[in-house]
Image (tube, rainbow, N blue to C red):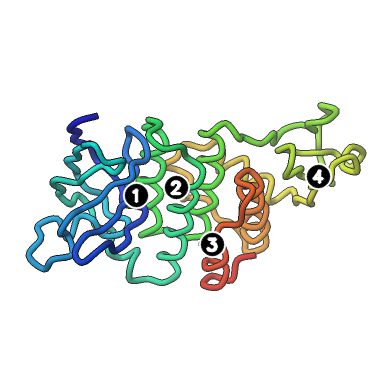
Amino acid sequence: MAYLKVEGLVLKNQDYKEADKLLTIYTPEGKISSIAKGVRKVKSKMRGGVQLFCHSKFELYQGRSSLVTVTQCETINSFTSLRTDLDRFAHAVYMAEITVELVPDREPNKDIFYLLLTCLHFLENYDPGLVTRLFEIRIINLLGYAPELNVCLHCGGSIERDAKFSLEQGGLLCSQCAGQYKYATNISMGALASLKALSNMNLDKCCRLRLGSADENELSSLLGRYIELRLDKKLRSRKFLNECSGSI
């Protein structure tokens, strides 16, 4: 890449030197680490477009440095409300960290970009817990970590009650097989039904769902632990989110 014009979402921004910012931008062309020089100056025309969660049009230049330079940017949507509401901010930060940690650099994926952009829009208007559960299961699916949600992943038998979920293997276990797996946890039939719906429904219709608090807390714990096991690390934003929203 020499020059690239692309839409992107700012997932991380960090002050650098006297007036610069280091950015992590997610684009349809993949995740890009970049530097925006002089952007913290009051008169900088790029100042608004590099704020956290901003959806902007970027002009990027790859020189000899490992960092891509942002030469121009134009704001499409600033998602201001996500930075002024602490609960929604915490959910957005969590989704951003999942993307940064799970998705490899410079790997094009238009579906993940569309998912993230859509969920940020949803997050402004709908239940943050529901939107975040939707994001978790969809990004897992898109990255090839989709769990088995229909039959026991060990014996292939149908499961009508007393389901377990293997965090390690990724999917359902019947009560007879669950004892053979170390990271098997309970999952209720209500939470399982909600998880299937979030995984399979048309994306634009998912926010019509209603999650009870018990099911939402159950899925929050299960999906968060599932993602952290895939990463083999704890997500700092998950602890922050739990403190803000009371999730498990």
Which numbered marker is on residue 24? 1
User: Which one is in front, 115 or 181?
Assistant: 181
Name which residue lies at 33% across and 34% down: 28
Name which residue lies at 31% across and 59% down: 52
- Mark sitting earlier along the chain (1/3): 1
Residue at the far top in the pictured view? 156
Residue at the far front in the pictured view? 64
- Mark sitting earlier along the chain (4/2): 2
- Mark sitting earlier along the chain (3/2): 2
Report if the CB atoms under discs 1 and 3 are less than 8 Å apart: no
Which numbered marker is on residue 236? 3
Q: Position of residue 103 (x, y in %)?
A: 47, 39
Q: Which type of secondary structure does the marked residue at label 3 adopt?
A: helix
Report if the CB atoms under discs 1 and 2 are less than 8 Å apart: yes
Report if the CB atoms under discs 1 and 4 are less than 8 Å apart: no
Is residue 31 positioned above or below 94 on the image? above
Q: Which type of secondary structure does the marked residue at label 1 adopt?
A: strand
Residue occupied by mark 4 = 163
Q: Which callout, 1 or 4, points to the residue nearer the camera?
A: 1
User: Which one is in front, 12 or 142?
Assistant: 12
In this rendering, position of residue 230 left or right of residue 47: right
- Mark sitting earlier along the chain (4/3): 4
Q: Amino acid at mark 2?
A: Val
Q: CA distance from mark 1 to mark 2?
A: 8 Å
Q: CA distance from mark 4 to mark 3?
A: 30 Å
Which numbered marker is on residue 100? 2
Q: Position of residue 177 (x, y in %)?
A: 89, 37
Q: CA distance from mark 1 to mark 4?
A: 40 Å
Residue 168 sits in quarter: top right
Q: Which callout, 4 or 3, points to the residue nearer the camera?
A: 3
